[in-house]
Amino acid sequence: MPNVFHPKSAVLRLGFVALADSAPLLLAEHLGLFAAHGVNVRLQREVGWATIRDKIIYGELDAAQAPAGLLVATNCGVSCIPTPCVTALVLNLHGNAITLSRQLREKGVQDGPSLAAHARSLEEPLTFGVVHPLSSHHILLRQWLQASGIHPEHGARIVVVPPAQIHRHLAAGNLDGFCVGEPWNSLAVLRKTGWCVATSADLAPGHPEKVVLVTESFAEKRGAEHLALVAALNEACAFCEEAANRPYVAEVLARGPFAGTPPESLTRSLVGPFAYGDGRTRDSQGLHIFSGDRANEPTGDKLRWVLNGLESTGILASGELPPAAASARWFRPDLYRKALRTSSAQELTTHHS
């Protein structure tokens, strides 16, 4: 493991939200990868994505795990001050699911079309939770509702709820369903308050999920630290992807931010088998993709999936998005490749010294 960057006294404050796909950040710390790459990281757990966004904008965080759509929102100034931000690393693909309440199952709902039929019999629209207005969760939920015959604007009410609170609102009857990352879908299944109708791997194979979000200013002024951070997290992503490591990954998470949460809620999607809660099960392969086949490279096609999803589902109007040439600066494969080259060069130097 190379020592790329030699920090002085600066601490790099790295924000995250407690989700199964925060695993690369937590394992990078646990395995000593940040230290091995010479970057002085302090992990900061945050309650939700709005807090992450605000702390990045106002300099209270230097970098953060974030839904790819949050990068779009921050650059475009959607519900915030427009702030130039970039990513040099995609942390994972997939990891989300759509969960419906147990009460809907008891009323005969078995899939999207039967949900649409039930919704037409109601005087009030059904209420669904997502974790951020511009997240992949919102895109996936709206696409699924539309494909099921439910208009997201008129046939449903969609509200924003922080990930760790979303299951409680389903259990309390405040939500009829939600789209959220693991382990909160599996927790609803375990506690028999909900059942999973589809995973994001089922709905949109290969979709980008979380990225490492930094301001453009940070990437320029603290470039060496940024590249070291990317290299360390890229290595952690590769560790988390290995099937043989998944039980250990789940164990580390269970001892950390998920202490008090049933460990099985983590192992179901990370290790398998994943239970939908309606009698169906599947193995965990592909539910979380942390590495492999250029998964971590922030390519233009990954950005286009986000932008197209936001526009095609009506979350953003085309006039709210910048020209393609402007948005192309947000995903930085050049910095990703530079981080890996710098890491490899330093490793080679270390081995020959």
Image (cartoon, grey):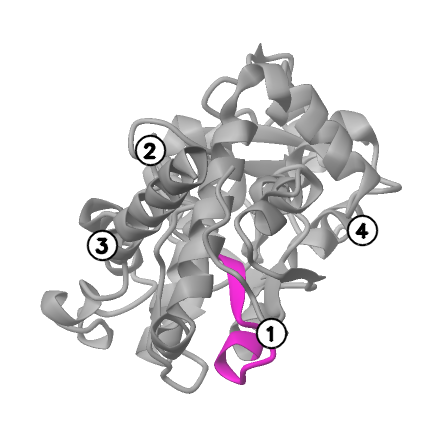
The amino acid type found where label 4 is placed reads: Ala
The amino acid type found where label 1 is placed reads: Ala
Going from N to C along the chain, the mark reached first, 4 or 1, is 1
Going from N to C along the chain, the mark reached first, 4 or 3, is 4
Q: Is residue 261 visible?
A: yes
The amino acid type found where label 3 is placed reads: Asp
Residue lying furthest right: 260
User: Could you tell me which residue is drawn at 77 percent across and 25 percent down?
Assistant: 264
Reading the image, the residue beneath label 4 is: 172
Reading the image, the residue beneath label 2 is: 206
> Mark on residue 10?
1
Q: Is residue 109 left or right of residue 226?
A: right
Q: Does the residue at mark 3 contact the one at mark 2 (Cβ under 8 Å)?
A: no
Q: Nearer the viewer, mark 4 or mark 3?
A: 3
**Quadrant in which residue 21 is drawn:** top right
Q: Nearer the viewer, mark 1 or mark 2?
A: 1
- Region of the chain picked out in magenta, as a range: 55-66
User: Could you tell me which residue is drawn at 37 percent across and 37 percent down?
Assistant: 348
**Of 201 and 193, the residue lying toward us:** 201
The spot of residue 199 in percent (x, y) is 49, 30
User: Could you tell me which residue is drawn at 34 percent across and 34 percent down?
Assistant: 204
Residue 334 vs 147, above or below: the answer is below
Q: Is residue 155 visible?
A: no
